[in-house]
Amino acid sequence: QSVLTQPPSASGTPGQRVTISCSGSSSNIGIYAVSWYQQLPGTAPKLLIYSNNQRPSGVPDRFSGSKSATSASLAISGLQSEDEADYYCAAWDDSLNGVVFGGGTKLTVL
Amino acid sequence: EVRLAQSGAEVKKPWESLKISCKTSGYSFTTYWIGWVRQMPGKGLEWMGIIYPGDSDTRYSPSFQGQVTISADKSISTAYLQWSSLQASDTAMYYCARLSVVVFPTNPNLYYFDSWGQGTLVTVSS
């Protein structure tokens, strides 16, 4: 049981916009910024979004993030086949005094 | 370029000990936290703990406290994760990752893993 809650799966067709939610609590997302990670099949996770909505250099602007209260969302517009991956949200947690992850969402491009 | 290069895959028997490594380059090793993350087969990411190589301050997730030891060697910019007695349930992929921490005077700190190692697969089987 992960501290942050994500839907286990999401899907969309090429060109569509999909969103993935991440629900937390007052000890994590309610205080701290959220980061998102993309894990392509068979590879290590990669930072996709940090500070709720900031993209590292090299991440396409099709990826965007937002946060409100104790929840966050990742949006992917103009969906492409290469976006098929697992996506994880994460945040610092004061109760744990460490990082908590969501359970991950498997995105399928139909 | 920031790089985290992990040691190779390991196959061990139950009750054996193991130490895996994460050699870093391209940045000041002593000024960033390094974390370890477990991913069991077909499962999600789990934070195990972090270490600040500058002063060896180490924090563990309650789920892993007492089960593993995290350490670092400043002289060779390398972090380690070790077990004294492996179990089959330790079979997993283990990632090291650099934790960026931005401190603000009046706002909560900002935390995120900005660079990851390629992973070390640990298989424990009799």
Image (cartoon, coloured by chain):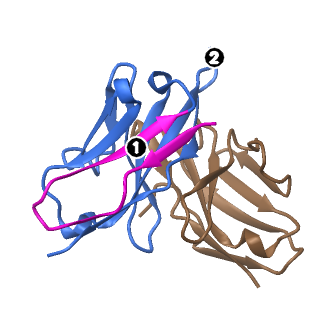
Residue under the point 47% across and 64% down: B44
Left or right, residue A83 beside residue A99: right
- Label 1 crowd (10 A; few <14 / some 14-19 / many >=20): many
Q: Where residue B88 appears, x then y in whole percent? A: 21, 70
| Quarter of the picture holding the C terminus of chain B | bottom left
In this orientation, which residue lies closer to the viewer: B84 or B109? B84
Is B104 placed above or below B15 here? above
Left or right, residue A34 beside residue A1: right
Residue under the point 78% across and 76% down: A81
Q: Magenta stretch? A: B1-25
Looking at the rendered structure, the secondary structure element under dot 1 is: strand
Q: What hue does chain A carry in this figure?
A: brown
Q: Where residue B9 appears, x then y in whole percent? A: 35, 62
- Label 2 crowd (10 A; few <14 / some 14-19 / many >=20): few
Residue under the point 71% across and 46% down: A68
Residue B22: numbered disc: 1
